[in-house]
Amino acid sequence: MKPSIYGLSRSALTDWILENGEKKFRAAQIWDWLYRNRVQSFEEMTNLSKNLIAKLNETFVVNPLQQRIVQESKDGTVKYLFELPDGMLIETVLMRQHYGLSVCVTTQVGCNIGCTFCASGLIPKQRDLSSGEIVAQIMLVQRYFDERDQGERVSHIVVMGIGEPLDNYDNVMTFLRVVNDDKGLAIGARHITVSTSGLAPKIRDFAREGVQVNLAISLHAPNNDLRSSIMRINRKFPIEVLFEAIEDYIQMTNRRVTFEYIMLNEVNDGVQQAQELADLTKNIRKLSYINLIPYNPVSEHDQYSRSTPERVAAFYDRLKKNGVNCVVRQEHGTDIDAACGQLRSNTLKRDRAANRARIAAAKAKAGIGDSRA
């Protein structure tokens, strides 16, 4: 399969142009066509020679994704199911915030982190997404608005979709450079957040990049016993190791870290656990922030349910009494397949059921009985 040209940073595109005997300014022209004009084919790049267009077509595709399903919520949230060139499925979510349009992108097909409450991990990791496949998610969401001529643009990105972003480190970093480029989409680094479940060595690598991109930690528990029971990654990088990396990150960057904490009813939402969380983050309180997230139930994980409003309020109050910066995150898309990975999982289940029905119908037509009878 040919790679997407979206996977090239501007400097990499310039290198490719020079290696193919073209003038350097051609890279700037192509970049402008891709990210300012947002064309969907090389033939639309009308100031390029036919020979260069042929070279581009031989080497790259523009958009590697096919749109399978779009779900629109009453609150303006839009959830997309995209098909990759190899037939794999991924999700992307657009959320309308008071500060602009925010897109949550996926970085892997499936996930190996092993969070027991998460729809994303229902299917093990199949592969990493290329940088071009990640960029294409932003481009297709932006195209959704371009086609409606609403004059709106994607202004914020959260790298929190299916998969562990720091497990696909190089492709995610290339993606960040492409979308942040001031001659392209120009999405400000401080408007981008990368989330990790806690890959401690990669957190330090990320700190050394010197980018202004925000970092979020999917914490979800204040102690090792509980976190290991709901997040397998904690067995490899326990809380002490994780927090050493976080403190190193803060020291190197002087940037605030956000902690994501999904509220699971009578699992991690007790007042005592709130106190443990306050104590755990005490040393970095001035440069940390906690998001309390309502849980979107997943049928395959029926041992978990959403925390009651009373338990959320008590948890929040205990954090605030300890001087913790925290908020209960606003929900988006509750009337559609809201949980991360849920649309993909449900679609795959429907596809499998439809395929079984087709096979059964074909057998019946051919007079082949059920071998189990």
Image (tube, rainbow, N blue to C red):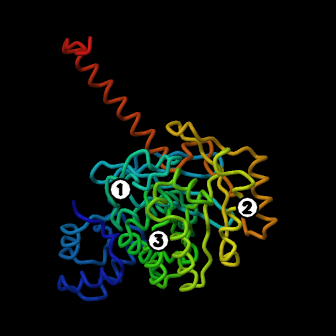
Looking at the image, residue 192 sits to the left or right of residue 319; the answer is left
> Which labelled disc corresponds to residue 200?
3
Could you tell me which residue is drawn at 67 percent across and 77 percent down? Answer: 283
Q: Which residue is mark 1?
A: 65
Task: Determine the CA span between mark 3 and mark 1.
Answer: 32 Å
Furthest toward the front, the residue is 225
Instruction: Pick whichever of labels 2 and 3 is earlier in the sequence.
Output: 3
Which image quarter is the N terminus in? Answer: bottom left
Percent x, y of residue 284: 66, 76
Which image quarter is the C terminus in? Answer: top left
Could you tell me which residue is drawn at 29 percent across and 25 percent down? Answer: 358
Percent x, y of residue 317: 80, 59
Instruction: Pick whichever of labels 3 and 1 is earlier in the sequence.
Output: 1
Task: Determine the CA span between mark 2 and mark 3.
Answer: 24 Å
Q: Residues within 10 Å of mark 1 (few under 14, many from 20)?
A: many
- Mark 3: secondary structure: helix
- Mark 2: secondary structure: helix
Furthest toward the bottom, the residue is 24
Compared with 36, 338 (above or below) is above
Residue 170's image quarter?
A: bottom left
**Foreground residue, 370 or 153?**
370
Q: Which residue is mark 2?
A: 275
Q: What amino acid is labelled 1 in the image? A: Leu
Mark whose residue sits in front, 1 or 2: 2
